[in-house]
Amino acid sequence: MYLDDTFRVKVGLAEMLKGGVIMDVTNADQALIAEKAGAAAVMALERVPADIRKEGGVARMAPISKIREIMHTVSIPVMAKARIGHFMEARILEALGVDYVDESEVLTPADEEHHIDKRTFKVPFVCGARNLGEALRRIAEGAAMIRTKGEAGSGNIVEAVRHMRTIQKEMKQLTVLGKEELVAESKKLQAPLELVEDVAQHGKLPVPNFSAGGIATPADAALVMQLGAEAVFVGSGIFKSDDPEARARAIVKAATYFNDPQKLLEASEELGIGMHGIDVSKLQESELLQTRGW
Amino acid sequence: MKRVGVLALQGDFEAHSLALARAGAEPVLARTAADLANLDGLVIPGGESSTMLKLLELENLFEPLAGFGRLRPIFGTCAGAILLATDVTHPSQPSLGLMNMSVERNGYGRQIDSRVAHIEPAPEFEQRTHSGELEAVFIRAPIIRRVGPDAHVLASYQGDPVLVEQGRHLVATFHPELGSDSRVHDLFLSKL
């Protein structure tokens, strides 16, 4: 592990976001609604995943003027997405001074072989993962926070659940293996032995493990928290619903009280119908966002 | 063994629980007014103060927490220090007002300005714990711009107080829970 001070400070901000909700926003008005509802951070992007899915085209880093406006409007951390492998989008976001960069499969990948070498940046990165090997490869590249990929813009929690359960199960399995078995496992996971050993020893990732991709209700947020997520990202779920303010507040409450069914009932009570959503199993392979990156 | 609550609405409450356990206390996660019963003290962790504030308001925890602080010690780090202050700026927001001080949110700037610093604590801090420099992890940290006349500044960084005791309460603008030096938690436990 790179336990130098720069990396500790990157992981430190992720620690501060635990138990919180990070909300996708496309402009300053939405950012303000998110902040007022109790978001722990906002994620600035050009279009929410549901619109990217619908409209198609190349999805890039958000316009700088929009991100800057959001940074000026709210006092909570502002994250922004860069395309997978697009280290120059990331450099520009770093120069702008965003608090976290999401090297995200939601945007159109810029490089089909290489992820960004995140160790060379001062700004921290979060990356998506579907399984432990993918999570550890991203951490080896310097990611200071991992989130499940789920299936962004689907309003369907099934993929985030699959990814969180997979990561948790694979971590548990490592804890009972012997030293030489970990060497073999490291090859299978395509991840550095040092990180595999760290997970085997602690039973958890060396960086915070959040969940994203399909969270649309307080119950969804509580579900992934129960499965081991330490905070949640909500993308299209809030601003693609007909009650963004109430829904944002309710999901904030659910992330805190994920263990308290009475509070979750209160949080769910005033909400109407959430975003329409997609049956992920009906999507073509080419329509999936989660298979971007490796 | 002292039972110390950790306000677990949002933030790095887990890191504080581990730090308290290492310092020899029994940490208890507190999310409701009922959870505040039978605690010897409370930690308000780092995190987003605006998020915590929202939940304090929504869940009617503001008064129970202020009431707790009138009787028992509270240790606030970063966002916790902001919530304990009498005045908050940049932007201004409500707070518990349990410590007479002004705090400016995100005083050093954004995450890019977060840092690990090594600071010389005040002699009083070293006398009450033990001597040696203090590692201070600042994450989008606030700056304490003013303290009251009865405040003890136990450590400063770049001329601003970063570890302050006033009466039964203690605040740090940095994160001792993210390091391995347990002296700040030890000091808090010695006050219970």
Image (cartoon, coloured by chain):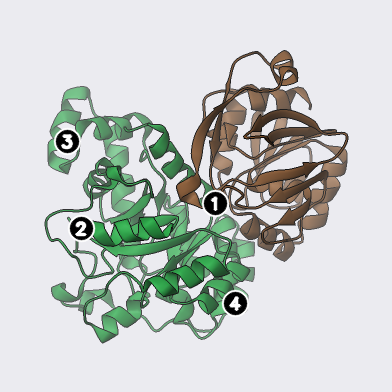
Chain colours: A green, B brown
Relative to residue B41, is residue A130 drawn left or right?
left
Which chain is home to disc 2?
Answer: A
Residue drawn at point x = 36 percent, y = 60 percent: A93
- As shown in the figure, which amino acid type bears the numbered disc 3? Glu
- SS class, disc 3: helix
Judging by the rendered image, the residue that carries numbered circle 3 is A185
Q: Which residue occupies the foreground of this view, A40 or A175?
A: A40
Instruction: Work out which quarter of the rendered image holds the N terminus of chain A and state it.
Output: top left
Circle 2 or circle 1, nearest the eye = 1
Both marks 2 and 3 on one chain:
yes
The answer, for residue A30, to whether it is visible in the render is yes
- SS class, disc 1: loop
State the mark number for residue A85: 2
Judging by the rendered image, the residue that carries numbered circle 1 is B109
Disc 2/disc 1 C-alpha distance (Å): 28 Å
Position of residue A186 relative to residue B21, above or below, is below
Which chain is home to disc 4?
Answer: A
Position of residue A98 relative to residue A69, above or below, is above
Residue A19, given in percent of the width and then of the height, sits at 53, 53
Q: Which residue occupies the foreground of this view, A15 or A73?
A: A73
Disc 2/disc 3 C-alpha distance (Å): 26 Å
Judging by the rendered image, the residue that carries numbered circle 4 is A246
